[in-house]
């Protein structure tokens, strides 16, 4: 029994013998995908499509992205089982990210079966793809059709509720899960999701009534202003939830309500240790700073909150307010410069890079950005000024030297350009780049020095003589 023997039989067109050898090998190595593929192929050769499909399907248990297998299964089922044919073709289109085609194939599969289980599973696939392509309304239609077949389908209810929550239609999500419970869905997970929705909708008593989560109950008691009850429950469960980030947000909320802001900060820092970079962390900080009357830190915290939520325009606006409250903050100025540039508001960004270079004259990044900008608008003289400032900080900066040389060339100050290129060659270890620079030097060395400005040459030389 060996692969070589099986392959020899196959090469000699002794397919029955090859098949027997591959079967023995499959028993010994049941997870070998290559052997399964050969078995599927040989069964097809011998006209046994049912057995071939069995082995091809086994491959998908281990490799659900194997398009070759889907193609083979489509060929097998094309004339015998339209449901499976369209399902496998839909799977293949899904893998190829041709989602609209996949949806059409899955719908054709549904039209070719009357089995409830197959219809429901395929509708889930269709609904999932509609969610993927951001067509929530059609996804909702599919989940509702699933519920027409199965009134107790927990997954469909939860999927619907999540879509409504994403659309911020909280009441529709509540109605959906209430309907689930009315139709006999007895699932603790569904009840807890419903409790969370009640909390979001301000139905705190209903949330307390159906939840088994002590932390959610504490949150509801705090929202109802029942501080004493909330504190008592926190003391009961504190040991149980000491590693849960949510516990420290609740404790921070208690301290906030008691106006003990230092304690509130202590708890939210503990929360941040357990739940890094959560928007909630910055939201809580913003609320505390607001009550302390610290406008600058309040605005910075709101800005970071919105940034983490992907709301860049709102974040920029908050950072601008923070800058107004404290124009000397390097962090805010630097962040605004970066965000405005990312937002394609380049002119506005350069204003902040200019401010940054004044607040921190040694910020190399700001000087490079400003030089880039000036060069891009053809203002080579000012670009050189910024690059000179950078050289004062870092006289061996080869990138800066190369760009200065290029700017001087464009200004037709060839001696100064040559001097920069020669300085570049002193410090550069990039042999390939050095050859390029030497070629540039050879090209411009013959140009008349009368075309350049001696004043500029004297100016640049003072940096190299330091």
Image (cartoon, rainbow, N blue to C red):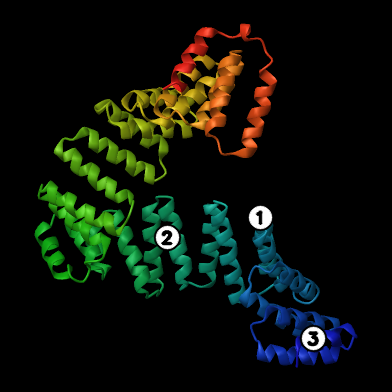
Residue under label 2? 161
442 shown above or below 127: above
- Give the Cα distance between marks 3 and 2: 57 Å
Q: Residue at x 66, y 9 (%)?
A: 448
Which quarter of the rendering shows the C terminus?
top left
How many residues crowd around disc 2 within 10 Å: few (fewer than 14), some, or many (20 or more)? many
Q: Residue at x 34, y 23 (%)?
A: 358
Q: Give the quadrant of residue 17.
A: bottom right
351 shown above or below 84: above
Q: Nearer the viewer, mark 3 or mark 1?
A: 3
Q: Give the quadrant of residue 366.
A: top left
Q: Earlier in the sequence, mark 1 or mark 2?
A: 1
Q: Nearer the viewer, residue 67 or 355?
A: 355
Residue 376 in sight? no
Q: Identify the secondary structure beneath mark 1.
A: helix
- Give the Cα distance between marks 3 and 1: 45 Å
Q: Viewed as shown, does residue 376 lie left or right of 87?
A: left
Residue 384 in sight? yes
- Give the Cα distance between marks 1 and 2: 24 Å
Q: Nearer the viewer, residue 333 or 153?
A: 333
Q: Identify the secondary structure beneath mark 2.
A: helix
Checking the image for residue 4, the label placed there is 3
36 shown above or below 106: below
Give x and y (percent) for residue 70. 72, 70
Give x and y (percent) for residue 374. 51, 20
Q: Identify the secondary structure beneath mark 3.
A: helix
How many residues crowd around disc 1 within 10 Å: few (fewer than 14), some, or many (20 or more)? some
Q: Earlier in the sequence, mark 3 or mark 2?
A: 3
Checking the image for residue 100, the label placed there is 1
């Amino acid at each position: 029994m060996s692969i070589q023997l099986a392959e020899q039989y196959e090469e000699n067109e002794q397919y029955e013998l090859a098949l027997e050898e591959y079967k023995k090998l499959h028993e010994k190595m049941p997870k070998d995908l290559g052997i399964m593929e050969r078995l599927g192929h040989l069964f097809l050769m011998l006209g046994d499509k049912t057995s071939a499909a069995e082995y091809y399907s086994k491959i998908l248990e281990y490799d659900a992205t194997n398009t070759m297998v889907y193609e083979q299964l489509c060929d097998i089922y094309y004339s015998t089982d339209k449901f499976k044919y369209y399902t496998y073709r839909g799977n293949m289109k899904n893998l190829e990210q041709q989602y609209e085609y996949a949806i059409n194939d899955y719908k054709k599969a549904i039209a070719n079966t009357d089995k409830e289980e197959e219809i429901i599973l395929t509708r889930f696939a269709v609904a999932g793809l509609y969610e993927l392509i951001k067509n929530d309304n059609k996804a909702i239609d599919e989940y509702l059709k699933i519920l027409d077949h199965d009134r107790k389908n927990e997954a469909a209810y939860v999927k619907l509720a999540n879509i409504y929550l994403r659309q911020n239609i909280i009441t529709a999500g509540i109605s959906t899960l209430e309907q689930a419970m009315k139709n006999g869905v007895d699932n603790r997970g569904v009840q807890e999701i419903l409790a969370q929705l009640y909390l979001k909708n301000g139905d705190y008593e209903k949330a307390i009534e159906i939840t088994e989560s002590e932390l959610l109950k504490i949150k509801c008691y705090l929202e109802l202003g029942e501080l004493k009850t909330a504190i008592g429950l926190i003391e009961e469960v504190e040991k149980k939830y000491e590693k849960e980030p949510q516990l420290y947000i609740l404790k921070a909320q208690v301290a906030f309500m008691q106006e003990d802001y230092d304690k509130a900060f202590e708890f939210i820092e503990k929360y941040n240790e357990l739940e890094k970079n959560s928007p909630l962390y910055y939201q809580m900080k913003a609320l505390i700073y607001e009550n302390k009357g610290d406008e600058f830190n309040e605005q910075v915290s709101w800005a970071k909150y919105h940034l983490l939520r992907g709301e860049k325009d709102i974040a920029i606006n908050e950072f601008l307010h923070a800058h107004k409250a404290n124009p000397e903050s390097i962090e805010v100025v630097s962040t605004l410069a970066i965000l405005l540039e990312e937002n394609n508001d380049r002119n506005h960004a350069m204003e902040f890079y200019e401010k940054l270079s004044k607040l921190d004259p040694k910020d190399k990044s700001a000087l490079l950005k400003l030089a880039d900008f000036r060069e891009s608008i053809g203002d080579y003289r000012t670009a050189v000024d910024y690059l000179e400032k950078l050289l004062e900080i870092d006289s061996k900066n080869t990138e800066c030297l190369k760009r200065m040389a290029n700017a001087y060339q464009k200004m037709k100050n060839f001696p100064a350009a040559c001097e920069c290129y020669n300085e570049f060659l002193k410090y550069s270890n990039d042999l390939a780049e050095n050859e390029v620079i030497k070629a540039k030097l050879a090209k411009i060395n013959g140009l008349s020095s009368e075309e350049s400005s001696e004043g500029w040459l004297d100016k640049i030389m003072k940096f190299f003589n330091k």
